[in-house]
Image: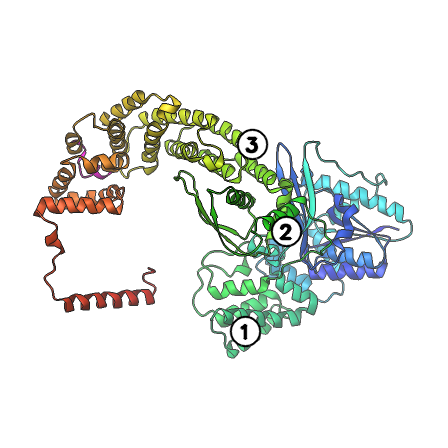
């Protein structure tokens, strides 16, 4: 007896019906399914009685790579039909593909993602021949809406055509050779009883050829490398994750529609689709009248006739709805006329139509389903710390118990576990903040995320450390600084050394002054305020700070050219140097005099950009407590319309208080601004506004008061208003009415 090969398109109701009917009719000895062979000894888990969709998730991690992939299954998946109906008729069930962690699947995020790119030329030719927009409409036209008579032959012809004579890649060849060994062994073991093979249609022609000859012994299961951590678990899935419009390359968008097609047939699916769209739009206060629905249904029926469909197909219904409900011109093509994620600019009604077709079904695992240790550990720890509910959580980081709760929440945040939103708390480069605010919410996506994160480790601390380590390998200077802070927030002490080693090496080779300055700011904050993270006065942190400070000064002295606008990142780099020398210079043995020499040379260098010259002048002024040169002369020398604001931005950023409290400086600035021509003032105004933005509101008030007193002798005169109280009240009422009208029309939001 030979095998019966059924090539399928994954997540196709038509293919699922063909598989179910074939297995029921043949009652085979074996049902062989494209799927991870390392799950064969756990197939019983798949048949526990879950609410679909679910997926087999496999996580892999070694010293060289980490990989995660899914094999999703829903009610209308041909693979699910093969397993359930095969089990019902007493067949032996086997997954026959390589394990998901295998290098041949290293680039595959989803095992059941149809790789149309490999045969795009053929499908594009077929789309032109049948006058349809894309492969989804082509598939519906050829298989989903048509009667089941002759379906097997039509599918075989289609997949023979799309495979053609194309040479598969090495990964496909390895997978097909492995699957063929399973098929040959099953056929030999079955004797006279039939064998049914269910695989993606792309593989079917090759498997038929490969099973004609070769050894007939059962293949061995590949073993992962000794240093690899591999885990496979069932996870709840959702229609949203299955939907091609959400980015999943399943080849079958709109899973909610195909669920209806599977359960009720094309006619009923079309009717329910129209109802679902109407209900969804009305729930969002969009008008959908009975006349609109009648027009949409009539248009869909007419399109079906024109396109040769016995019943309205998915695109017929959608085109009918779009025609009836959208009257204005569309900025982008209808999403079902293309493939992939929804584009920006779609009409709101179109977006709701796509969402209605997607559906909101979320799978649920049977209570007996094995889960990775991380799920149990997180559940226990959240319960123990009183974080297993919903609501606002305020943590006092001055208390050890709240620091423990904070570390747990940060570990889950690093693992991207949903339902945990951090509203406020310590942040990189910030001062010591002892209060942290979180919002906890229930999320259907939490369990799948925890299962998938289980590949990182068995408890939150180990998993967070592994996740951070993975991010480090691809991190740039800015990201490394953030990862250091994350490691501290998570209480992952053993990771900190690794991050710091990477930081120290990156500091020595850094070429971007802004990124290096930000890193220095973050590391200094950790060194100064790290009592709650056990990083305060760290020797290793001090080494990074010293190296970064020297590197910033070296890079800054080499900057030449440039005018406007001021580069805030390099200004912030000099702010970081000032703070290091002020708060850590003595403790770390830094050479403040050498830094002052760099600042003086830069301040006097006319080839350096104005903002850097101003910042360097301010650096020397703030560190010494007095300016090395006459501030008035320096200000006059820098005060040209094109560059005055940028120079002042650097000065104010580094020596704001010195400027504010040095007699005559503000008055000089007022004099210079007042002497500008109208044209020069307009040229300088944007940069001047940015520069004075470094003064907080209280200090701006001081500046305003001093200048008014200098010009008028008293600021009280400006507070006197020559108008009656009634006129003032009428003016305020008018302002309120104008603001209300602007808010009502959406012209202001505050």
Residue 110 visible? The answer is no
Badge 1 element: helix
Q: Quadrant of the C terminus?
A: bottom left
Q: Nearer the viewer, mark 3 or mark 1?
A: 3
Identify the secondary structure beneath mark 2: helix
- Tag on residue 494? 3
Looking at the picture, does residue 549 appear above or below residue 330?
Answer: above
Where in the figure is residue 168, as x and y percent of width and height?
68, 42
Q: Position of residue 191 (x, y in %)?
A: 91, 49
Is 643 within the magenta? yes
Task: Categorize mark 3 by other alpha carbons within 10 Å: few (<14), some (14-19), many (20+).
Answer: few
Q: Nearer the viewer, mark 1 or mark 2?
A: 1
- In the image, residue 6 sits, relative to residue 509, either above or below, namely below
For the residues labelled 3 and 1, the Cα–Cα distance comes to 63 Å
Q: Which residue is mark 1?
A: 296
Which one is closest to the eye, mark 2 or mark 3? 3
Q: Nearer the viewer, residue 443 or 109?
A: 443
Residue at image mark 2: 122
Start-end of magenta stretch:
637-647
Quarter occupied by residue 8 = bottom right
Which residue does the image show at 23% across and 65% down from the upper left?
735
> Is residue 237 depicted above or below 264 in this figure?
above
Residue 204: give x, y in percent of width and height. Answer: 74, 49
Which of disc 2 and disc 1 is earlier in sequence? 2
Mark 1 closeness class: few <14, some 14–19, many ≥20 residues within 10 Å: many
């Amino acid at each position: 007896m030979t095998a019966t090969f059924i090539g399928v398109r994954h997540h196709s109701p038509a293919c699922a019906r063909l598989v179910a009917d074939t297995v029921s009719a043949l009652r085979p000895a074996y049902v062989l399914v494209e799927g991870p062979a390392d799950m064969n000894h756990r197939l019983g888990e798949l048949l526990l009685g879950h609410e679909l969709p679910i997926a087999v998730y496999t996580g892999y991690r070694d010293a060289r790579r980490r990989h995660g992939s899914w094999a999703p299954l829903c009610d209308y998946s041909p693979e699910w039909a093969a397993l359930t109906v095969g089990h019902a008729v007493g067949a032996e069930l086997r997954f026959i593909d390589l394990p998901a962690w295998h290098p041949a699947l290293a680039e595959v995020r989803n095992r059941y993602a149809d790789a149309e790119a490999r045969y795009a030329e053929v499908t594009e030719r077929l789309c032109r021949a049948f006058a349809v927009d894309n492969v989804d409409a082509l598939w519906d036209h050829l298989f989903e809406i048509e009667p089941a008579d002759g379906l097997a032959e039509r599918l075989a012809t289609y997949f023979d055509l799309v495979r053609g004579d194309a040479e598969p890649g090495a990964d496909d060849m390895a997978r097909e050779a492995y699957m063929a060994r399973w098929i040959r062994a099953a056929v030999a073991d079955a004797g006279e009883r039939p064998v049914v093979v269910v695989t993606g249609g792309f593989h079917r022609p090759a498997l038929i050829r490969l099973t004609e000859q070769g050894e007939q012994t059962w293949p061995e299961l590949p073993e992962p490398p000794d240093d690899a951590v591999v885990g496979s678990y069932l996870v709840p899935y959702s229609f949203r994750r299955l939907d091609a419009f959400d980015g999943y390359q399943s080849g079958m968008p709109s899973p909610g529609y195909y669920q209806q097609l599977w359960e009720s047939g094309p006619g009923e699916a079309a009717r329910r689709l129209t109802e679902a769209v109407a209900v969804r739009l009305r729930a969002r206060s969009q008008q959908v009248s009975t006349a609109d629905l009648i027009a949409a249904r009539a248009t869909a029926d007419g399109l079906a006739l024109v396109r040769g469909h016995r019943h309205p197909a998915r695109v017929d219904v959608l085109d009918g709805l779009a025609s009836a409900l959208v009257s204005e011109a569309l900025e982008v093509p209808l999403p079902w006329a293309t493939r992939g994620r929804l584009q920006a600019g779609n009409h709101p009604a179109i977006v709701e139509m796509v969402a209605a077709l997607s559906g909101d079904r979320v799978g649920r695992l049977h209570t007996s389903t094995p889960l990775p240790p991380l799920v149990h550990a997180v559940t226990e720890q959240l319960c123990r710390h009183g974080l297993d509910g919903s609501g606002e959580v305020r943590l006092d980081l001055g208390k050890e118990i709240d620091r423990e709760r904070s570390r747990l929440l940060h570990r889950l945040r690093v693992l991207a576990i949903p339902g945990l939103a951090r509203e406020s708390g310590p942040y990189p480069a910030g001062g010591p903040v002892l209060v942290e605010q979180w919002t906890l919410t229930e999320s259907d996506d939490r369990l799948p995320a925890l299962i998938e994160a289980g590949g990182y480790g068995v408890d939150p601390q180990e998993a967070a450390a592994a996740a951070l380590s993975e991010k480090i390998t691809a991190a740039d200077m800015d990201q490394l600084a953030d990862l250091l802070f994350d490691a501290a927030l998570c209480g992952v002490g053993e990771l900190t050394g690794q991050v710091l080693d990477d930081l120290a090496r990156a500091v020595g080779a850094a070429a971007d002054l802004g990124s290096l300055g930000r890193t220095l700011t973050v590391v200094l904050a950790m060194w100064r305020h790290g009592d709650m993270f056990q990083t305060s006065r760290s020797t290793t942190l001090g080494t990074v700070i010293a190296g970064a400070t020297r590197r910033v000064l070296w890079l800054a002295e080499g900057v030449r050219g440039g005018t406007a606008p001021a580069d805030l990142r390099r200004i912030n780099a000099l702010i970081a140097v000032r703070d290091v020398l002020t708060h850590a210079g003595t403790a770390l043995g830094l050479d403040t005099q050498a830094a002052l020499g760099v600042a003086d040379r830069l301040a006097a260098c006319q080839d350096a950009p104005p903002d850097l010259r101003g910042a360097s002048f301010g650096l020397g002024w703030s560190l010494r407590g007095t300016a090395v040169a006459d501030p008035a002369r320096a200000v006059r020398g820098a005060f040209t319309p094109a560059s005055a604001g940028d120079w002042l931005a650097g000065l104010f950023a580094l020596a704001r208080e010195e400027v504010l409290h040095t007699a005559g400086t503000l008055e000089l600035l007022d004099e210079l601004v007042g002497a500008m021509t109208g044209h020069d003032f307009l040229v300088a105004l944007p940069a001047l506004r940015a520069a004075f933005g470094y003064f907080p509101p209280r200090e701006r008030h001081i500046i305003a008061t001093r200048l008014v007193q200098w010009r008028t002798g008293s600021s009280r005169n400006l507070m006197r208003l020559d108008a009656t109280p009634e006129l003032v009240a009428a003016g305020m009422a008018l302002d309120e009415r104008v603001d209300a009208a602007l808010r009502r029309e959406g012209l202001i939001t505050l």
